Amino acid sequence: MANPLADLTFDQLFRKARTANAWQDLDVPEVMVRAIYDLMKWGATSANISPARFLWIHSDAARARLKPHLMEGNVPKVLGAPWTVIIAWDEKFEDKVPELFPHNPGARDWFTDPDAHFDAAFRNGTLQGAYLMLAARALGLDCGPMSGFDNKAVDAEFFAGDVKMKHWASNFICAIGYGDDAALFDRSPRLAFDDANTTL
């Protein structure tokens, strides 16, 4: 049986972790991006389908392509971050099921119903996006997740013409780097256990 982590870990991942709105002028090397993925990929998904796909925006040219599709208030959050990741899901995720669920390759047929297919992809892809944020925080980075952008325009800009990404669909985006604490908002309240939970 695993032992609880040190209390300090809970601060870094949850209690003191904040949504970054601005960034320190500190580089984040690509090796850190790869380390984030190599942690988050172990998070659980239904039948290990792992439908999330990630496009990492780093170059000035890529930022310039993303900028017109952002809500105005999100532009500085993205342009100031060393990395912004577009968290997407693969509309053809079932093609990887025989590889990812080898003891039951026929599991790909569980997702032939269009509604079940979408639900599995979107739910599990979103879950993987949350794993990614926790992995980034575990590595000492800050996250600025946001949904204020034009999904269809982003998909057309980055995914439509690419052989590898043509079946990807964006979910949300997350700026990643070392946050500037001076730009943090006051912490908003959270619901108490009795307000958000019921036990039977």
Image (tube, rainbow, N blue to C red):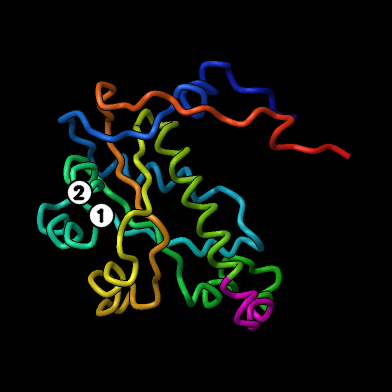
Residue 50 coordinates in the image, percent (x, y): 53, 61
192 sits to left or right of 154: right
Residue 71's tag is 1
Highlighted range, magenta: 108-118
Q: Which mark is residue 75?
A: 2
**Residue drawn where x is 23% and y is 71% of the image:** 157
Q: Residue at x 74, y 37 (%)?
A: 197
**Secondary structure character of the magenta stretch overall:** helix
Q: Which mark is residue 142?
A: none
**Among the 4 quarters of the image, the one containing residue 120:** bottom right
Marks 1, 2: nearer the viewer: 1
**Amino acid carrying mark 2 in the image:** Val
Real-space CA distance between mark 1 and mark 2, rounded to the nearest whole angstrom: 7 Å
Q: Quadrant of the N terminus?
A: top right
Residue farthest top in this picture? 7
Which element carries disc 2, helix, strand or loop? helix
Kindly state the secondary structure of the residue where label 1 is placed.
loop
Magenta stretch: includes residue 117: yes
Identify the residue shown where x is 61% and y is 56%. 45
Amino acid carrying label 1: it is Met
Q: Position of residue 16 (x, y in %)?
A: 45, 22
**Does 39 sit above or below residue 53?**
above
Q: Are marks 1 and 2 in contact (CB under 8 Å)?
A: yes
Determine crowd level at label 2: few under 14, some 14-19, many 20+ residues with C-alpha closer than 10 A: some
